[in-house]
Amino acid sequence: MKTTRRDKELFESQHYNRKLSRPMTFPFSRPLSDPLNGGGFDPDATAYIALLSGDGASVSGSQAAAINDFFVSGKDEGWYSELKRLYLPIWGAAGPNARCLVSGTSGTFNGSMTHGSGFVTGDGSSSYFDVGATPSAMGIANGDAFLMRGIHTSPAGGVHSGFGVADTSTAASLAMLNFASTHASAGMTYFRQPSSTASAQITGQGSEYRGIYIGSSTATNARFLLRRRSGGTTVVSNTTLATTAIKDLSPYCMARRLTAGLNTPSPGSEFAWAFGTGMTQAQAEDFTAALETMWETCTGLTLY
């Protein structure tokens, strides 16, 4: 197809605007419904979209654009390299929901998990998602670790809601926990890495746990827990020196994995999970903002 002067002007304008605000990247001559045939898409975004299609998911042009913009933002802002596993269980089926955006590998759903439109819902007793890779295999260690969960519906029924991996409930942890409404610590979410003394805690939430949570450790005496909601972010930190190694078992999502087995499975609904090496607070702010935009654009839902 012949490229006109107007085409060139339009392309140059889009290129200039992208430098300012990193919008979704498209070639000026390719329709949004054709995301897999080159045309300016990030190669890792293209690979993930192709895997989703192979898993049976139908990805629209606007969804593909949102995914692409997420990858572009992550690489521009520097947090993408910290991601080792990232799951977006929004596609209504186990196959595409289990697919990692970063590694291309798949974890495993267990128990009675319900795959909804834009999120998955646990049964609170037997359901969980197994990442299928240990922290050490992902390059994660005490002082260089993060995990993230996106909660769409708060757990009900007076139960704890866990996430991650630990030796016991207090030791060798890379884990989060939302406390049950019936517990003395109700209204608290903690990020524990690696022990109960090295825990960053957000309190006063009542029974409302919706939002995106990321706990990150950038040194054995530096960790924080960040919660993103539609109104902004809340951050708490902890500087206790703790050198215990993380338990080297494959982490669980929508439940916590202990050496003794499944612990604190959630009956709530969640839409994103991630694990990786330590993000700074600035990177966590950018990462969670990009994730919120991608999820909202792909699902039509809104972060609480």
Image (cartoon, rainbow, N blue to C red):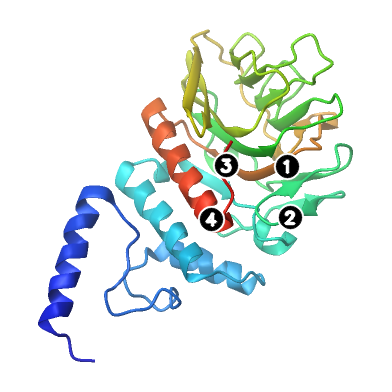
Q: Secondary structure at mark 4?
A: loop
Q: Position of residue 38 (x, y in %)?
A: 36, 75
Label 4 crowd bin: few (<14), some (14–19), many (20+), radius 10 Å: many
Q: Amino acid at mark 1?
A: Ser
* Quadrant in the rendering for residue 215: top right
Q: Secondary structure at mark 3?
A: strand
Cβ atoms at labels 4 and 2 below 8 Å apart: no
Q: Position of residue 223 (x, y in %)?
A: 50, 19
Give the mark nearest the N terminus, 4 or 3. 4
Cβ atoms at labels 2 and 3 below 8 Å apart: no
Q: Position of residue 96 (x, y in %)?
A: 65, 62
Q: Circle 2 sits on which residue?
A: 116
Cβ atoms at labels 2 and 1 below 8 Å apart: yes
Give the mark nearest the N terminus, 2 or 3. 2
Q: CA distance from mark 4 to mark 2?
A: 19 Å
Q: Amino acid at mark 4?
A: Leu
Q: Secondary structure at mark 2?
A: loop
- The mark lying in front, picked from 3 and 1, is 1
Q: Circle 3 sits on which residue?
A: 274
Q: Amino acid at mark 3?
A: Ala
Label 3 crowd bin: few (<14), some (14–19), many (20+), radius 10 Å: many
Give the mark nearest the N terminus, 3 or 1. 1
Q: Amino acid at mark 2?
A: Gly
Label 1 crowd bin: few (<14), some (14–19), many (20+), radius 10 Å: many
Give the mark nearest the N terminus, 4 or 2. 4
Q: Is residue 135 visible?
A: no
Label number found at residue 101: 4
Label 2 crowd bin: few (<14), some (14–19), many (20+), radius 10 Å: some
Q: Circle 1 sits on which residue?
A: 269
